[in-house]
């Protein structure tokens, strides 16, 4: 039966090619604009660590008190004092303080120019907490954290440049004026948005190339390469920076069960109360413990422009659907005579619905195929015109391919519901009489 | 011709009429807002920074291995910066150069509160730029009152610590903001945490901050120049080249810097890094890339939308013509002229369009309100709505014209021909 309806549908579509082309074009363009903006939106609002994101939490401790800049919302980053205290108390299953650094990598080869390597100062638990994949070796140990050891984890690309991709574990690299022992080499790892570093940096930067122990980096007076916010400016010198109320350190914890989460909340409350009692905080405890998605939301990972274009593109699709309703109605009702004959010969209303449903679906498929081609074109255009760091994100994969086709068919069939209903209730007697 | 028969015909094809009206309403709502967004973005992008943008470039460089928190390290860095600047200023392509951490539109916002007293509420906030006596000449900023910095006023900025220079130069916007009576020159102000005052010795006509974001408070024009040379391993040199020598300077500037210190880092822009040496046009393009893309998308979507709506109206209108062949034939046989038939379909279309446009105007403001709440857009000006209304009425009439003309060609004999 399906095959017969398909033949009927195709014959009907061929009968008025202009009307058919109009519908296919409308659906194609509507779907393509939605999908093009959606690829960008999807890339930006993505979860790069879906298997674990529900266990990751981001504590905030209010070190400023109520102030004109943030109001009563605590700053998203932490002071050095609070970060170190949280690490020392170690109340989460896994936890790490972190801040972005940019040491200079010197090469032994005199023909190679020195380069800045973007990276992070983290604690040893950062690697198991984020399931960071290693090509060679692994992260450093908790003992290395405590001893402020000169160890480093480097990225695959840095390993390629410095050691031609060979296993460099145990070798040493020269960062600024110190040498560090390589404890591990990462496999390809560039989560986007870069959720672990949102407190101080943009969500879509370049991949980190070097990781050093937090304790070692602060020892070496490696300044943050990013946000450093103060309510009261520190005196000169590194020690004053560490002791200041300026916030510049991100913090992440892994909490596996709801009871761990509530225990950690209680701990943060107690910590802030202690600081209040000691006179460091002149205000009541004001903490947050945001989960992964709340954190991405809070940090405005998806820029408003991306949201605007996505919404406007969806509205375009809506107009295209309204357009298709009108055209399908015209098309189906023009064939009232045919419907009348089929009904008189014994076709049920359901059979009529199936016939026109198949026809609408065919238009949807054709629109979907056109939409796919246009989406591909759209994504190419976006690559050329988006800021470099976003452009790489927008890509077409198999899932998007299916989503595009599905969206086209669903949109067309939805648009076809009313015209199909009208076709089902064409009165056969009236049609036959008129003819 | 009376409208009455048209209305009664429309009543019999309620669905089609409603669909066209709805489509016109939605299209109007989207196109008006899209045009408005495009206009807003272009306005943002077109704002001059106040600099002489044509002949400017900025070079980022890092010297590592020098501890800037020790006195010896500082002295080394200071000497190296002075040597770099001397080398740059001697280049034949270069007119002047200075060192800083950011310039307008370059990103990296360094902000401070500013007030009339060492304590109390802040009168305003400002973005500050490190500057020396070469800054005004290099950037091409126009001094409208007061004077430039003197070389003996330039202090050291070690990146941290309280900022309280004895003298500052501010943008006119900030000056008027702080001192609405226009007497800012010579007045003392205090930055965040400062205990010593900074006196305004100069006012420049216009200087944008390093961020493109422009909220309703227009803080993007509140800039301050502080007489400080940044003495840190990472820094930027801003270079003004001779007219027509920008391309040459893009090569000679990094070469001169490498000649001073072969071990320094100047990112070459490979591997996804931002290039270390950028002309101002690049800085501007990168700063506004998001806005430009949004404007382009809105433009494309509007064009598609208008095309789809136009085609939809044409499609439905010709369906109606087809449906009413006999009816048209009868009217022609009874003496209606071709012109009457065309007029009939155009008036029918106009009635539907006007209904659609009325609903559309309401939708437009609803949609604008939603965008305002969600994305901090400003209120839509009625001019855009008017433009949209005219555009859609013309589009709709244009789309109905071809089917109407086809209807006019229907011969009276159709009236008696069996369908």
Image (spheres, helix red, strand yellow):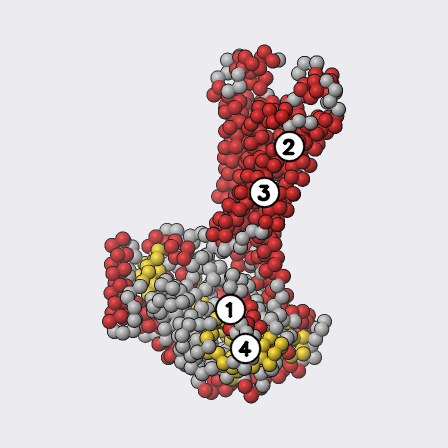
Q: Which one is in front in this view, the residue at disc 2 or the one at disc 1?
A: 2
Say whether mark 4 and mark 3 are on the same chain. Answer: yes
Badge 1 is on which residue?
A: B108
Q: Which one is in front in this view, the residue at disc 4 or the one at disc 2?
A: 4
Query: Would you place residue A98 above or below residue A256 in this image?
Result: below
Rounded to the nearest angstrom, the CA distance separating label 2 from label 3 is: 16 Å
Is residue B348 rendered to the left or right of residue B163? right
Rounded to the nearest angstrom, the CA distance separating label 2 from label 1 is: 55 Å
The subunit carrying tag 3 is: B
Q: Which one is in front in this view, the residue at disc 4 or the one at disc 1?
A: 4
The subunit carrying tag 4 is: B
Rounded to the nearest angstrom, the CA distance separating label 4 from label 1 is: 27 Å
Residue B349 numbered tag: 2
Looking at the rendered structure, the secondary structure element under dot 3 is helix
Q: Quadrant of residue B302?
A: top right
Badge 3 is on which residue?
A: B28
Say whether mark 1 and mark 4 are on the same chain. Answer: yes
Residue B73, image x, y percentages: 47, 84
Query: Would you place residue B44 above or below residue B387 in this image?
Result: below
Residue B132, image x, y percentages: 57, 81
**Label 2 crowding class (10 Å Cα cut-off): few <14, some 14-19, many 20+?**
many
Q: Earlier in the sequence, mark 3 or mark 4?
A: 3
Q: Which residue is located at x 64 percent, y 30 percent?
A: B348
Rounded to the nearest angstrom, the CA distance separating label 4 from label 2 is: 62 Å
Badge 4 is on which residue?
A: B184
Q: Earlier in the sequence, mark 2 or mark 3?
A: 3
**Label 1 crowding class (10 Å Cα cut-off): few <14, some 14-19, many 20+?**
some
Tell me the quadrant of the picture where the C terminus of chain B can be found: top right
Residue B318, image x, y percentages: 66, 28
Looking at the rendered structure, the secondary structure element under dot 1 is loop
Q: Which residue is located at x 40 percent, y 72 percent?
A: A231
């Amino acid at each position: 039966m399906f095959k017969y309806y398909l033949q009927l549908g195709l014959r009907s579509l061929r009968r008025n090619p202009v009307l058919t082309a109009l519908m296919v074009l409308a659906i194609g363009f509507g779907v393509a604009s939605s999908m093009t903006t959606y690829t960008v939106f999807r890339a930006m609002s993505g979860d790069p660590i879906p298997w674990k994101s529900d266990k990751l939490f981001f504590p905030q401790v209010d070190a400023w008190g109520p102030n004109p800049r943030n109001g009563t919302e605590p700053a998203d980053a932490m002071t050095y004092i609070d970060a170190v205290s949280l690490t020392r108390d170690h109340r989460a299953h896994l936890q790490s303080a972190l801040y972005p650094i940019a040491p200079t990598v010197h090469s032994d080869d005199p023909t190679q120019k020195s380069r800045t390597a973007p990276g992070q100062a983290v604690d040893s638990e950062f690697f198991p907490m984020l399931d960071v994949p290693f090509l060679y070796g692994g992260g450093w140990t908790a003992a290395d954290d405590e001893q402020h050891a000169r160890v480093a984890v480097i990225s695959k690309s840095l390993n390629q440049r410095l050691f031609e991709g060979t296993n460099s574990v145990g070798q040493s690299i020269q960062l600024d004026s110190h040498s560090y022992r390589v404890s591990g080499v990462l496999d390809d790892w560039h989560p986007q948005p870069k959720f672990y570093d949102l407190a101080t940096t943009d969500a879509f930067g370049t991949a980190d190339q070097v990781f050093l122990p937090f304790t070692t980096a602060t020892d070496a007076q490696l300044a943050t390469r990013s946000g450093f916010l103060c309510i009261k400016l520190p005196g000169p010198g590194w020690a004053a920076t560490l002791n200041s109320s300026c916030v510049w350190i991100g913090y992440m914890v892994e909490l596996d069960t709801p009871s761990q989460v509530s225990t950690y909340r209680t701990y943060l409350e107690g910590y802030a109360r202690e600081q209040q009692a000691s006179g460091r905080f002149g205000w009541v405890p004001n903490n947050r413990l945001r989960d992964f998605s709340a954190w991405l939301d809070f940090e405005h990972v998806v820029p408003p422009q991306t949201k605007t274009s996505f919404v406007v593109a969806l509205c375009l699709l809506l107009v295209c659907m309204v357009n298709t309703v009108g055209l399908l109605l015209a098309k189906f009702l023009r064939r009232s005579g045919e419907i009348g004959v089929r009904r008189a010969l014994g076709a049920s209303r359901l059979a009529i619905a199936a016939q026109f449903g198949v026809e609408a679906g065919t238009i949807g498929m054709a629109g979907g195929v056109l939409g796919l081609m246009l989406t591909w074109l759209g994504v190419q255009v976006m690559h050329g015109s988006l800021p470099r760091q976003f452009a790489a994100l927008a890509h077409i994969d198999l899932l998007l391919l299916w989503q595009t086709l599905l969206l086209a068919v669903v949109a067309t069939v939805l648009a076809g519901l009313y015209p199909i209903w009208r076709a089902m209730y064409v009165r056969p007697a009236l049609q036959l009489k008129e003819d | 011709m009376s409208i009455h028969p048209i209305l009664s015909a429309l009543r019999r094809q309620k669905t089609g009429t409603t669909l066209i009206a709805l489509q016109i309403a939605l299209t109007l709502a989207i196109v008006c807002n899209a045009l408005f967004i495009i206009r807003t973005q272009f306005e943002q992008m077109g704002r001059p920074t106040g600099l002489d943008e044509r002949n400017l470039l900025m070079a980022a460089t890092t010297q590592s291995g020098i501890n800037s928190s020790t006195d010896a390290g500082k002295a080394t860095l200071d000497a190296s910066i002075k040597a770099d600047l001397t080398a740059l200023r001697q280049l034949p392509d270069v007119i002047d150069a200075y060192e800083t951490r950011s310039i307008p539109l370059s990103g990296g916002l360094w902000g401070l509160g500013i007030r009339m007293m060492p304590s109390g509420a802040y009168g305003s906030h400002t973005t500050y730029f490190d500057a020396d006596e070469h800054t005004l000449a290099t950037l091409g900023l126009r001094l409208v009152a007061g004077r430039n910095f003197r070389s003996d006023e330039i202090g050291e900025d070690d990146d941290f610590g309280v900022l309280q220079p004895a003298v500052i130069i501010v943008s006119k916007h900030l000056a008027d903001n702080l001192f609405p009576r226009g007497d800012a020159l010579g007045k003392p102000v205090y930055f965040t945490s400062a205990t010593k005052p900074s006196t305004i010795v100069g006012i420049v006509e216009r200087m944008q901050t390093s961020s493109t974001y422009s909220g309703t408070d227009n803080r993007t024009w509140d800039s301050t120049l502080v007489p400080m040379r940044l003495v840190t391993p990472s820094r930027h040199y801003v270079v003004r080249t001779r007219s027509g020598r920008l391309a040459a300077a893009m090569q000679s500037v990094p070469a001169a810097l490498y000649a001073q210190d072969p071990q320094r880092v100047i990112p070459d822009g490979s591997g996804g890094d931002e290039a270390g040496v950028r002309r101002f046009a690049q800085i501007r393009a990168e700063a506004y890339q998001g806005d430009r893309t949004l404007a382009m998308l809105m433009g494309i979507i509007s064009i598609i939308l208008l095309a789809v709506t136009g085609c939809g109206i044409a499609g439905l209108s010709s369906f109606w013509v087809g449906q009413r062949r006999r009816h048209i034939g009868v009217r022609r046989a009874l003496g209606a002229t071709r012109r009457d038939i065309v007029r009939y379909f155009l008036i029918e279309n106009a009635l539907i369009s006007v209904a659609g446009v009325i609903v559309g105007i309401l939708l437009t403001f609803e949609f604008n309100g939603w965008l305002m709440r969600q994305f901090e857009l400003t209120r839509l000006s009625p001019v855009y709505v008017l433009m949209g209304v005219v555009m859609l009425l013309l589009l709709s009439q244009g789309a109905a014209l071809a089917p109407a003309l086809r209807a006019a060609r229907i011969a009276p004999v159709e009236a008696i021909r069996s369908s």
